[in-house]
Amino acid sequence: MNLKHFSLFLDSELVVVKEEVPKLISNLFNDSSESEIEVDTPERQEDDLIFEGNFGKAIMIIYQGSHLEPELREFLFKILGAVGCSLKDIALAASESVEEVSLKSIETLNPSKILVFGKLNHELSNKKQHNYEILNDEGVEFLFADDLKDINAQINLKKSLWSKLQVLFGIKS
């Protein structure tokens, strides 16, 4: 397959970590690649957050779970579009990925805004006071909200989220 064929079924950007390219290439030519992956994965010493996007506007979005269902992904990107953002502007991370890294590794990314949808078992949650309340802590604006699944299903939660996003992103209606 070539890039044209891949583009027919891949709907989001792929990110390859520069340091992992030699390992990926060696796995292509090695028959025992599965066992190597199992051995290498637990040895991950880095405390780097795994996320989608280019983080151009330094906005971090964390969603509950390990992946976003297509319907919820579409809903999230409609929300982002309404506030003038796309995948190139944000770091989109699963709560499961965030829970594996330290607060310091998130602070190293220097986000300007952090939006958390749903439950998060991480030090970041200590900053939460109430859902749909904007908090400014050392120059970083936080907004905690319900799980995307709940927001998508309930109009009152959509209204609460939208009113706070307008304030957070300076949108005048």
Image (cartoon, rainbow, N blue to C red):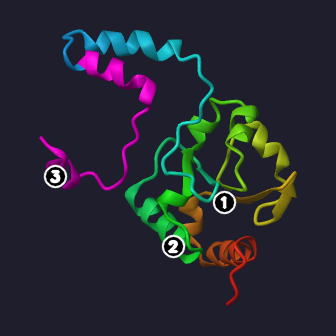
Residue sitting at 71 percent across and 38 percent down? Answer: 108
The residue to which callout 1 is attached is 146
For the residues labelled 2 and 3, the Cα–Cα distance comes to: 26 Å
Residue, disc 3: 4
The disc at residue 135 is none
Q: Mark 3: which amino acid? A: Lys
Quadrant (top left/top right/bottom left/bottom right) for the N terminus: top left
Q: Can you tell which of label 2 and label 1 is closer to the viewer?
A: 2
Residue drawn at 60 percent across, 42 percent down: 95
Tell me if mark 3 has few (under 14), some (14-19) or many (20+) residues whose alpha carbon lies within 10 angstroms of its own: few
User: Which amino acid type corresponds to the residue marked 1 in the rendered image?
Assistant: Asp
Work out whether mark 1 precedes mark 3 in sequence or the reverse, and give the earlier one.
3
147 or 92, which is in the foreground? 92
Residue at coordinates 61% horizontally, 57% vertically from top-left? 147
89 horizontally vs 161: left or right: left
Which residue is label 2 attached to?
81
> Earlier along the polypeptide chain: callout 2 or callout 1?
2
What is the x, y in percent for residue 114? Answer: 70, 54
User: Is 12 covered by the magenta stretch?
Assistant: yes
